[in-house]
Image (cartoon, grey):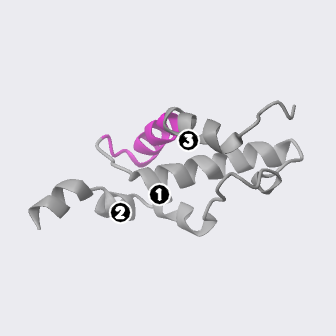
Amino acid sequence: MNTMSNPFDVWCCTWKMLSDGILYQKRRELNLPDLQISDDDLKNLCLIEIEKLLNENGRSLSDYPSLPTPVVEDVNTFHNKLIADELSYDRVELAALH
C-alpha cells in the first residue's frame, strides 16, 4: 500500500513478535521444548518467512532497500534435530563462564 514511511523502523519494533510463532513451531517440529535460538537466527528465520509471503504476492524484500535480507543457507540448521539440539545453548551464560 506504500503507506509505511520507514519499513526498517517497523521491522525493528515488530521482529520479536513475528518470531515468537517461528520459535514455537521449531520447538514442536523438532520435539525440543527447550530449544533456544539466538536473536540473529530468529531474525533470519523471520525474514525468510516474510520473503515467502511477499513472493506469493509478487513482491520481495529487495523491493524495500532499508530492510535486511535473509541468509537462506542457514535455514537448514533448524530442520535437523541433532544439529538444532547441539546449537541450543545459552551463549550469554557460556560467555560469562569462560
Among numbered discs 1 and 3, the one appearing first in the sequence? 3
Q: Quadrant of the C terminus?
A: bottom left
At x 59%, y 69%, the residue is 73
Q: Quadrant of residue 82?
A: bottom left
Stretch of the chain drawn in magenta:
18-33
Compared with 86, 50 (above or below) is: above
- Residue position for label 2: 82
Compare residues 15 and 88 and report the one nearer the observer. Answer: 15
Q: Is residue 66 left or right of residue 80?
A: right
* Residue occupying image coordinates x 62% and y 64%: 72
Amino acid type for the residue under numbered disc 3: Cys
| Residue in the foreground of this view, choosing between 67 and 23 | 67
Instruction: Tell me which residue sits at (64%, 52%) in the image.
Output: 48
Q: Which residue is mark 3?
A: 12
Q: Is residue 73 magenta?
A: no
Element assignment for label 2: helix
The residue most toward the left is 97
Gap between marks 1 and 2, in whole Å? Answer: 9 Å
Alpha carbon of mark 1 to alpha carbon of mark 3: how far? 23 Å
Q: To which residue does mark 1 refer? A: 78
State how many labels appear: 3
